[in-house]
Image (cartoon, rainbow, N blue to C red):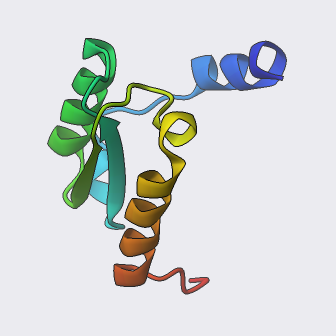
Amino acid sequence: TFFGIDLPALSAWTFGAEQPPAISQPVLSVLGTDTEPLWIEVAERLRAWLAHVEECTIENVGHLLHMQRPEPVAKCIAAFFSRYPLTGN
């Protein structure tokens, strides 16, 4: 589905300078300490675009951090949602 649906949809999606200011929700960015430079740049872009980005860094993992060290990733996500619970609004 990635090549047949996700990638074409992503290519058709536009996200310009006018969209980021409209996003007021907190955003969680989870990075590994062994993350490749591309993903470091993506995290930097998120911080530049969005007003409320929280970053959580997981030691000794790369891009597949959720597979390499699922427990600290889950704890990071759980802590984020405890601060910003989903309300359905």
Q: Which quarter of the figure has residue 59?
A: top left
Task: State whether residue 52 is above or below residue 31.
Answer: below
The answer to whether residue 82 is seen in the rendering is yes
Decide which of 58, 40 is in the foreground and name it: 58
The answer to whether residue 19 is seen in the rendering is no
Decide which of 68, 86 is in the foreground and name it: 68
- Determine whether, in the image, residue 30 is placed left or right of residue 74: left
Q: Residue at x 53, y 80 (%)?
A: 86
Decide which of 44, 14 is in the foreground and name it: 44
Count of labels shown?
0
| Quadrant (top left, top right, bottom left, bottom right) of the N terminus | top right
Where residue 65 sits: x, y (%)? Answer: 46, 36
Where residue 42 sits: x, y (%)? Answer: 30, 27
Where residue 64 sits: x, y (%)? Answer: 51, 29
Task: State whether residue 83 is above or below residue 1.
Answer: below
Q: Residue at x 44, y 52 (%)?
A: 73
| Quadrant (top left, top right, bottom left, bottom right) of the C terminus | bottom right
